[in-house]
């Protein structure tokens, strides 16, 4: 693994951005903005990303490039004969659990892309807005809760992941990212242009871009902090794994800034797309939650627009691209670990990681249908894995990574990675180290406690 590197700086950035940009940027960010004071949330979110998200990202970058290994191996190298390797193992386990259900969601995006292209998604005859919304909602429920079609699409996505991952880091992940990430941004810009042309666009933009600072509360701050960490894929082992593929000449601070700003740009553009639409079509807060936003609300909006099938197809193509780049980066965490830990070839590692998904992702998909009677802690299999991995394991891993880098790794190691062994100015390093050592662990712990209290 240590000898494998990204071929170009553009490919390095595209792959890392692709690992961070996902469905959370598309539906979670607009929902958080809507429910947390609009532009006030946006301001706090940007501050959280700059002041906290980037330092923690740099801690993971330093771990991966300095340790030159997978998410577990780097801890073993830096603290041999200790139990810190468990942190890396937790991140790998969490990422694999996420992969099990994320592959199912990625399959949903392909189904809606296909139905948009064929026009089947809009094969409805209704005489009122309420009836149309109910029709799209019923379509979503009928599809998600069925057994056959979701499984076929899930298996298709597993196959796509296998093809890309088998091709390797340069010819697979990097080449795919170089194509898909520019496509994603191009599609976002097209939709921004369409949304901004709507009659009531200024009203929606005002909510999104004109802050009312009186709406900032501790809840807003905690939610903004949580969204910033979630959107940057911190704690999943992805950034540690990908940064092990960075050449030693890579400047980590500019890289982290570029990745974070592009990730923020995706979320910002989604806000530009969504909120003018809300202002024009009178959507309420309940329409901006999770699967409802993507699979009910947005198809309803497209149905009011000329060239409905075109815009719907382009949007779900955008969503499909985001889903594919995310699943591939999540899977790479486990592939790298299998290669390092068990000295397996990449081909063998890819099959070891992806073949079990034909069972695990099947269970997640069927948990909305045939297996909906199985509940763990009051949740079906899909929701249980989602809650355990994203709401509990990822924050715990992030806290422990910060503690490890702040207190248990030599200060010289962290400093040398940030400054490229003194070749880059270290003026910002004291701030980064202070945040990672003292501030970030406390605030991430607050997120964790808040999620339980809520």
Image (cartoon, rainbow, N blue to C red):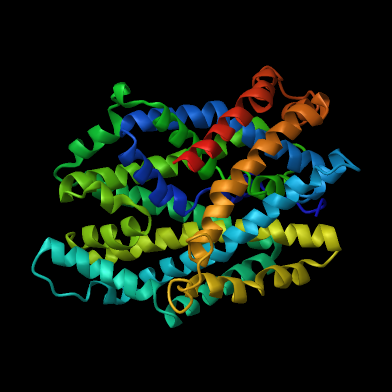
Taking depth in this image into account, of 323 and 364 the one nearest to the observer is 364
Relative vertical location of residue 72 with respect to residue 375 in this rendering, above or below:
above
Asked whether the viewer can see residue 173, the reply is no
Where residue 326 appears, as percent x and y from the top left, is 55, 56
> Is 425 located above or below residue 286 in the figure?
above
- The residue positioned 55% from the left and 42% from the top of the image is 232
**Does residue 175 appear to the left or right of 185 in the view shown?**
right
Q: Farthest residue toward the bottom?
A: 148
Horizontally, residue 112 falls left or right of residue 88, namely left
Q: Looking at the figure, which quarter contains the C terminus?
A: top left
Q: Is residue 27 above or below residue 432?
A: below
In percent of width and height, residue 216 lies at 36, 25
In the image, farthest residue toward the left: 127
* Count of labels in the image: 0
Q: Nearer the viewer, residue 118 or 333?
A: 333
Name the residue: 48% across, 62% down.
379
The answer to which of 371 and 96 lies nearer the viewer is 371
Q: Position of residue 451 (x, y in %)?
A: 49, 41
Q: Residue at x 45, y 73 (%)?
A: 372
Q: Quadrant of residue 137?
A: bottom left
152 relative position to 333: left or right: left
Q: Position of residue 118 (x, y in %)?
A: 31, 77
Looking at the image, which residue sits at the far right?
Answer: 81
- Nearest the viewer among 14 and 159 is 159
- Identified at 69% across, 18% down, the residue is 430
Instruction: Say above or below: 34 vs 186.
Output: above
């Amino acid at each position: 693994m240590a000898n494998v590197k990204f071929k170009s700086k553009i490919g390095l950035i595209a792959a890392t951005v692709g690992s961070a940009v996902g469905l959370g940027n598309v539906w979670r960010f607009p929902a958080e903005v809507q429910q947390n004071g609009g532009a006030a949330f946006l301001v706090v979110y940007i501050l959280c990303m700059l002041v906290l998200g980037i330092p923690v990202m740099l801690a993971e970058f330093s771990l991966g490039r300095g340790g030159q290994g997978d998410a577990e191996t780097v801890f073993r190298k830096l603290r041999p004969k200790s139990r810190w390797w468990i942190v890396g193992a937790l991140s790998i386990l969490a990422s694999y659990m996420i992969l099990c259900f994320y592959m199912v969601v990625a399959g949903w995006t392909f189904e809606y892309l296909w139905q948009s292209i064929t026009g089947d998604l809009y094969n409805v005859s209704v005489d009122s807005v309420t009836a149309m919304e109910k029709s799209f909602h019923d379509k979503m429920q009928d599809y998600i809760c069925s057994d056959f079609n979701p499984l076929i699409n899930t298996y298709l996505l597993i196959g796509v992941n296998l093809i890309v991952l088998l091709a390797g880091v340069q010819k697979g992940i990097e080449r795919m990212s170089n194509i898909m990430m520019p496509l994603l941004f191009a599609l976002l810009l097209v939709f921004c242009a369409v949304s901004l042309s709507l009659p009531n666009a200024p009203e929606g933009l005002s909510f999104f871009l004109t802050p009312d600072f009186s709406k900032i509360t501790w809840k807003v701050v905690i939610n903004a902090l949580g969204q910033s960490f979630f959107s940057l894929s911190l704690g999943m082992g992805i950034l540690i794994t990908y940064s092990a593929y960075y050449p030693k000449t890579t400047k980590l601070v500019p890289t982290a800034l570029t990745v974070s700003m592009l990730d923020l740009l995706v979320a910002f553009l989604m806000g530009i797309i969504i909120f003018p639409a809300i202002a024009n079509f009178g959507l309420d807060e309940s329409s901006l939650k999770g699967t409802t936003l993507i699979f009910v609300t947005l198809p309803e909006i497209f149905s009011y627009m000329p060239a409905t099938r075109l815009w719907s197809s382009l949007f779900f193509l955008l969503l499909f691209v985001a889903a594919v780049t995310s699943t591939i980066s999540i899977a790479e965490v486990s592939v790298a670990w299998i290669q390092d830990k068990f000295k397996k070839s990449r081909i063998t590692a890819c099959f070891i990681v992806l073949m079990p998904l034909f069972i695990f992702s099947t269970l997640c998909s069927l948990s909305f249908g045939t297996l909906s009677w199985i509940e763990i802690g009051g949740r079906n299999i899909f929701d249980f894995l989602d809650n355990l991995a994203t709401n509990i394991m990822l924050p715990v891993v992030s806290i422990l990574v910060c503690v490890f880098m702040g207190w248990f790794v030599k200060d010289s190691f962290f400093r040398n990675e940030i400054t490229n062994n003194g070749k880059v100015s270290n003026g910002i390093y004291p701030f980064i180290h202070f945040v990672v050592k003292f501030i970030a662990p406390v605030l991430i712990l607050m997120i964790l406690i808040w999620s339980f209290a809520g």
